[in-house]
Amino acid sequence: MPEPWAFEVWPARPAPDPGECLTSYLLRLAEDNGRVRVWELIQDVFPGWRFPHQLRVLRWEYPVDAWGRLPLRAQRSPAELAALTVASWVAKFRALPAVDHRGNRSPASALRGAIAPTLRVCPRCLEAAPSVPLLWRLTPVVACLEHGCWLQTRCPDCAHRPCQWTRRRWCANSSATQRCGSCSIQWSRWCPPMRRDRRGPRLRCHS
């Protein structure tokens, strides 16, 4: 990647966490660069996007519009960014669909039902790193195996969702992976209920 001009890159360019999903990484980039709304960051990445409802295409955790300016702004290679998506998993079963949002194409036909409509978080994991693993974005994954607890989809105090996509907008502020956007409770300070099997003991992951 050629050396960029200073004005072409964002001041904060954190590396993706291992196994992190694209949504989580975009939220962290927005937070670290002082963007209150993710839409402000996305407009810089994809200058052709005109309306907030276009953010819906990002819910699929899939490469969009050849990444726009994201590789330049964040100084990350397309391969690094692709690792934040389900593209490698999709490639195991079918040819990868090309997604050009301006052409009104979406990976929905391949991923509908497989990706959860809202972020799910394990508050205990957020104590170690304020990022959301790609694995938690899969609909069948409902619990954190490391801590034996349910993944949380709503704030325990006000029932606000950390991040969700509606028909018109992406409902999240840039700190959605760290605190509730409604009441500002820190996700990592909340102790979630333990998942239990029929006999009652806590489920554990054995190596």
Image (cartoon, rainbow, N blue to C red):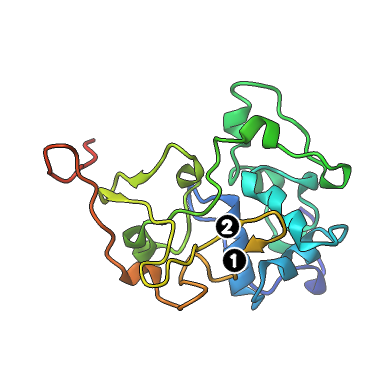
Are there few (<14), some (14-19), or many (20+) residues within 10 Å of tag 1? many
User: In the drawing, what numbered circle is on residue 164?
Assistant: 2
Where residue 38 sits: x, y (%)? 67, 67
Q: Position of residue 9 (x, y in %)?
A: 75, 68
Q: Which residue lies under the disc numbered 1? A: 172
**Amino acid beneath label 1:** Ala
Q: x and y percent of residue 115 in the render?
A: 55, 41
Residue sitting at the far top: 93
Pick whichever, 199 or 99, lies toward us: 199
Residue 52, relative to residue 58: is it above or below?
below
Q: Can residue 80 be seen here?
A: no
Residue plotted at (87% across, 47% down): 102
Camera sees residue 170: yes
For the residue pair 117 and 98, the one nearer the viewer reads as 117
CA distance for labels 1 and 2 = 7 Å
Corner quadrant of residue 172 = bottom right
Viewport quadrant of the C terminus: top left
Q: Is 5 or 104 nearer to us in this picture? A: 104
At x 31%, y 68%, the residue is 190
- In this rendering, is residue 77 above or below 189? above
Amino acid type, callout 2: Gln
Q: Are marks 1 and 2 in contact (CB under 8 Å)?
A: yes
